[in-house]
Image (cartoon, rainbow, N blue to C red):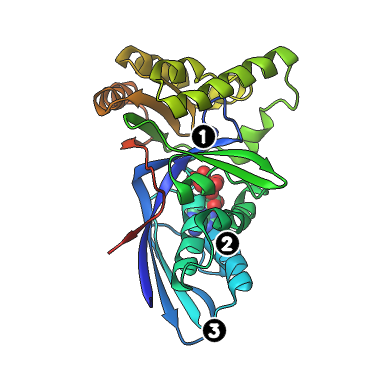
């Protein structure tokens, strides 16, 4: 294979009570990336459209992740990468992760698929370290594997891939406000009470069980975050109103996507998810910043190859 074009999807990390350990993959928001073999050895980012991002490998998450994998695979040809960004950077729906995961997928494909998708996660995480300070997996894992990805442990890296219930839909609203990562981090408390930890464990266990059994009611009861949402949500305009209208539409529940400012809601069926989108639109009708609203099924397979 001399050339490959891929679709690298957006993802939601920090899925409610799965703060820092659970992410999911969206289906109809994503970047496109093209990889071509070249005679000159090494990796190059030759073009980026849709966003003002650096071509320099060491400043771009796709470059850092890709370089980590190139060093491991050491192919005897070069690779040129083109990135068409559709996911806005800093949106909280895994813009950087789509690039990092896409880079390692594309390089691995041109090298003849020596590594499995699960093995690629480690290299994609190296890209994430560039922008978030830590090599976290809760966006790159669902981007690569699809469905839900549960990060059981980082040392050793132990990731459980879980299929999403068939009728699960996400509605995501991205208010285009600047939410500095430093602010969304600084509001977090470093300690939790035993009571909070027990509640969170109960909800997370229930949520994982609900995914395996497609028990939507249980899933809805578990979408409750004790640790982060009460603190972080004050930084997101209309957070409570957005959740309230979603509940009125019959949604299962939701929370902050990644570190925000996007807010996600999960629903059983497209109709409810569309109702949530319309109700959210009404809430932000008169605000003085732009908002993108996406309705998407859960992507069950992750990054895919385009013909
Ligand atoms: P998101 O949660 O939407 O991924 P992040 O804060 O994790 O947002 O990442 C966005 C940051 O990463 C921005 O500062 C952006 O400049 C930087 N960045 C570097 N390379 C890329 C890339 N290829 N795609 C997206 N963002 C990138």
Q: What crowding class fits label 1: few (fewer than 14 Cα within 10 Å), some (14-19), or many (20 or more)?
A: many
**Up-down relation of residue 81 to residue 276 (above or below):** below
Look at discs 1 and 3 and give the one toward the viewer: 3
| Residue nearer the viewer, 241 or 94 | 94
- For residue 294, the mark is none
Whether the residue carrying mark 1 lies under 8 Å from ligand 1 is answered with no
Badge 2 or badge 3: first in the primary sequence:
2
Q: Quadrant of residue 76?
A: bottom right
Provide residue 88's location: percent of width, then percent of height.
42, 48
Residue ID at (30%, 16%): 249
Question: Could you tell which of marks 2 and 1 lies nearer the N-terminus?
Answer: 2
Q: For mark 2, what is the residue?
A: 65
- Residue 260 numbered mark, or none: 1
Image x and y of residue 53, in percent: 48, 60
Q: Quadrant of the C terminus?
A: bottom left
Residue 161 horizontal side relative to residue 293, left or right = right
Q: Badge 2: how crowded within 10 Å, few (<14), some, or many (20+)?
A: many
Q: Could you tell me which residue is drawn at 50 percent across and 83 percent down?
A: 77
Q: Give the labeled residue for mark 3.
A: 76
Q: Is residue 307 above or below residue 177?
A: below
In this rendering, does residue 286 appear at all?
no
Residue positioned most to the bottom: 39
Q: Residue lying furthest left in this view?
A: 271
Disc 2 to disc 3, C-alpha distance: 19 Å
Residue 205 percent location from the top left of the image: 58, 23
| CA distance for labels 1 and 3 | 41 Å
Q: Mark 2 or 3, which is nearer the eye?
A: 3
Name the residue: 40% across, 49% down: 9
Quadrant of the snapshot with the N terminus: bottom left
Mark 2 beta carbon near ligand 1 (under 8 Å): no
């Amino acid at each position: 294979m001399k050339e490959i074009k891929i679709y690298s999807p957006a993802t939601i990390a920090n899925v409610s009570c799965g703060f820092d350990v659970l992410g999911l993959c969206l289906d109809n928001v994503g970047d496109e990336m093209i990889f071509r073999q070249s005679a000159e050895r090494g990796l190059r980012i030759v073009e980026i459209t849709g966003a003002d991002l650096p071509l320099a490998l060491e400043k771009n998450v796709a470059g850092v992740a890709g370089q980590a994998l190139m060093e491991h695979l050491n192919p005897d040809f070069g690779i040129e990468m083109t990135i068409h960004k559709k996911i806005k950077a800093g949106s909280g729906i895994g813009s950087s992760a789509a690039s990092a995961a896409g880079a390692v997928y594309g390089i691995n494909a041109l090298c003849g698929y020596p590594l499995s998708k699960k093995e690629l996660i480690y290299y994609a995480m190296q890209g994430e370290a560039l922008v978030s300070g830590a090599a976290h997996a809760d966006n790159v894992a669902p981007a690569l594997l699809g469905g839900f990805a549960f990060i059981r442990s980082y040392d050793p890296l132990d990731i459980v891939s879980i299929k999403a219930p068939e009728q699960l839909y996400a509605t995501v609203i991205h208010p285009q406000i600047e939410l500095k990562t430093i602010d969304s981090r600084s509001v977090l408390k470093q300690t939790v009470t035993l009571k909070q930890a027990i509640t969170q464990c109960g909800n997370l266990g229930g949520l994982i069980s609900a995914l395996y059994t497609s028990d939507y009611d249980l899933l809805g009861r578990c979408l409750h975050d004790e640790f982060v949402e009460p603190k972080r949500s004050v930084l997101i305009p209309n957070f409570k109103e957005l959740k309230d209208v979603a509940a009125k539409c019959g949604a299962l529940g939701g929370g902050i996507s990644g570190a925000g400012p996007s807010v996600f809601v999960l629903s059983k069926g497209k109709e409810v998810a569309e109702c949530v989108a319309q109700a959210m639109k009404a809430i932000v009708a008169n605000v003085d910043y732009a908002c993108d609203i996406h309705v998407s099924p859960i992507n069950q397979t992750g990054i895919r190859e385009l013909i």
